[in-house]
Amino acid sequence: MSVSPQDQARILIEALPHMQRYDEEIVVVKYGGHAMGNEAMAQSFARDIVLMEQTAINPVVVHGGGPQIGDMLKRLGIKSEFAAGLRITDKETIEIVEMVLAGSINKQIVGFINAAGGRAVGLCGKDGNMVQARKVTRSVVDPGSHIEKVVDLGFVGEPEKVDTTVLTQILGRELIPVLAPVATSAEGATYNVNADTFAGAIAGALKAKRLLLLTDVPGVLDKSGALIKELSVDDARRLIADGTISGGMIPKVETCIYALEQGVEGVVILDGRQEHAVLIELLTDAGAGTLIHH
């Protein structure tokens, strides 16, 4: 499909107010899911991030890597157990988690952004004491006895403190930080942190203009399956209470609420499988996904 020069110019002019709105602002993008495993989509995502940086937005990329961790554990013959929807991470597993997240995946994303003309810097929560984590405890109800018991998830953590020193040195210098959700505890142990939670903590600490959570669904859907374009925090809590927001979407929305409480202006849950979803959300009138705000 060829676009006339006039149409190209019109598209750019339409993007202008959006560019001005995000000028020099920080946008944290949580990148994961199936969009990450597909090379063509990963390259397209990298170009979008470079374009954001070129329009004077300061992007920070936080990535996950659950499927890739699973693949590597399988290749090495290490059995993985889950409880309360979270991977139980023992000493052997955390080494693999760190290797995959802070190593291969992180550098792959850095490579794609650099190949697209950007200058990405790969880091994890350990670097510069960026994220200090504490151990996560979860309880599950035993289906047989209906007794609630605490599950030891091993080296699974949640952010306790964020030090933005390293990030503030990088941002605004044409460098794009790419962060793996691995952190250290106060005692020096390595913890695997859920990437959504990690992104929420980073966005909150940086007082980001936007946190974009790329998922494998269009956004928050109503009971009939239609996309809800916008929600206040109160609306979101009501939809969780009445069961409209359910399953894996609940922790995502809770991360959004947490980030807003930390000082992020708006959080968007959007479909990472849609090409250029990030640009459609930030630089067009239509937007993409579900915006959650105060």
Image (cartoon, rainbow, N blue to C red):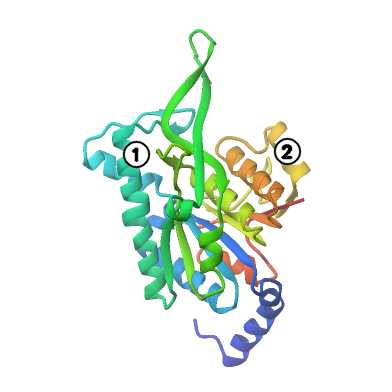
Marks 1/2: CA–CA distance: 34 Å
Q: Nearer the viewer, residue 175 or 11?
A: 175
Q: Reply above or below: 199 against 193.
A: below
Report x, y in % for residue 68: 34, 48
Q: Nearer the viewer, residue 120 or 5?
A: 120
Task: Report if residue 261 is visible in the image.
Answer: yes
Question: Hey, which quadrant is residue 23 in on the image?
Answer: bottom right
> Residue drawn 55% across and 51% down?
199
SS for callout 2: helix
Q: Is residue 38 visible?
A: no
Dot 2: few (<14), some (14–19), or many (≥20) neighbours within 10 Å? Answer: some
Q: Residue furthest left?
A: 76
Please provide percent x and percent y for residue 153.
Answer: 43, 29
For marks 1 and 2, give the one nearer the viewer: 1
The relative height of residue 216 versus residue 174 in the rendered view (above or below) is: above
Residue 275 numbered tag: none
Across and down, in percent, residue 232 comes to 76, 48
283 or 177: which is nearer to us? 177
**In the rendered view, does 157 fall on the left or right side of 287?**
left
Q: Residue at x 70, y 53 (%)?
A: 263
Query: Mark 2: which amino acid?
Result: Arg
Which circle's residue, 1 or 2, is located before the other in the chain?
Answer: 1
Q: Determine whether 157 is above or below 163 in the image.
A: above
Find numbered disc 1 in the image and state the secondary structure of the residue it sits on: helix
Residue on which the image places disc 1:
94
Q: Residue at x 39, y 63 (%)?
A: 109
Question: In which quarter of the view is residue 118 placed?
Answer: bottom left
Question: Which residue is label 2 attached to?
Answer: 237
Q: Amino acid at mark 1?
A: Ile
